[in-house]
Image: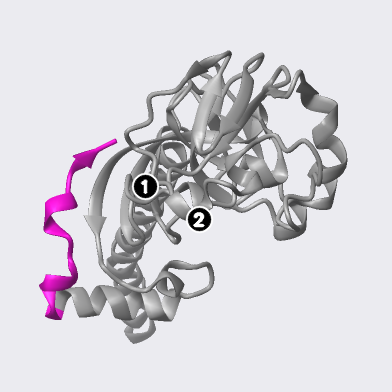
Amino acid sequence: MKADAVADAVAAEKEKKQPAASSMNDRVWREVVSWFWVILAFLLIEGTLVQARVIPSGSMERTVLVGDHLIVSRMGYDAGIPFTPYHVPLWRSPKRQQIIVFRAPLPEQGNPDFIKRCIGVPGDHIRIVAGQVFVNGTRLNEPYAYRDQFAMGSSAENYPPTENYTLDGRATPEWSADMANHIVNGELVVPAGHYFMMGDNRDNSNDSRFWGFVPRANIIGTPLIIYMSIDAREDVWGPGEAIQRFGTYASALIHPGIIRWNRLFHTL
């Protein structure tokens, strides 16, 4: 009898523990499912709708400044898997004078993401004379462009060059060799499926003048709005500077004066 009582007590204890264990498993499973949907939503938004970007250089000043944090729309331009090279171009294409984020055709540098202004679309004839840009024979109205008056005689501001396609050593070897194939009657002709990009800060911009056209497949999207702007050195925002960047954000909390408040929520 005593043994039976002990067995019954053990069985009862097991029955008490099973619901608790089952309840714990349910909670863990619900947490896993919740995080799965959160991660899936992030991948969908980041891969097809919008991305957050920070400006690391002054090639687009004064339109966007070093330390400007942008929301970039990918909608209709590009869809891909975040943090991978896998992506698919969509139906929208850049318009002339639109600001565009794209993968620069610089494989030796890992095809870095650049932000520039689209100056030429497929079929356009481009010529630059003393810093003034002419497209299809008409001078572009460019109130956004910043030019150094002392650089008006440079080959980059009189383009395409009639000789010395290296552009004083600034052009890539590939573009130096290929540039002449796209010049007709002293004008650069943009081929089908490609775009010609230039920075607004014309004499401080590494752009299509020096490495050629941007394929449509390299287009990522267009910036929408500046959601944060912090006045800090260029090297803080470069790739691989996570520690310096974190320190800059912490400094902005302590010294809010380094935040450019007048630029917040500025649309582009």
Tell me: residue 73, above or below residue 192: below
Looking at the rendered structure, the kind of residue marked 1 is Val
- Residue occupied by mark 1: 38
Q: Is residue 67 left or right of residue 136?
A: left
What whole-number distance in Å separates the C-alpha atoms at marks 2 and 1? 41 Å
Residue 33 drawn at (x, y percent): 40, 48
Q: Secondary structure at mark 1?
A: helix
The quarter of the picture where the N terminus appears is bottom left
Answer yes or no: is residue 217 visible.
yes
Q: Is residue 161 left or right of residue 197?
A: right
Residue 131 drawn at (x, y percent): 51, 38
Look at the image and give the residue range highlighted in magenta: 254-268
Residue 227 drawn at (x, y percent): 23, 49
> Which residue is located at x 34 percent, y 37 percent?
144
Badge 2 density bin: few <14, some 14–19, many ≥20, Cα 10 Å: some
Q: Is residue 154 left or right of residue 227?
A: right
Considering every residue shown, the one lying at the far bottom of the view is 2
The quarter of the picture where the C terminus appears is top left
Inspect the magenta stretch and tell me whether residue 263 lies in it. yes
**Quadrant in the rendering for residue 156:** top right
Q: Secondary structure at mark 2?
A: helix
> Which residue is located at x 49 percent, y 41 percent?
116
Inspect the magenta stretch and tell me whether residue 56 lies in it. no
- Residue occupied by mark 2: 204
> Which residue is located at x 34 percent, y 76 percent?
246
Tell me: residue 197, above or below residue 194: below
Residue 161 drawn at (x, y percent): 73, 38
Q: Nearer the viewer, mark 2 or mark 1?
A: 2
**Quadrant in the rendering for residue 175:** top right
Badge 1 density bin: few <14, some 14–19, many ≥20, Cα 10 Å: few
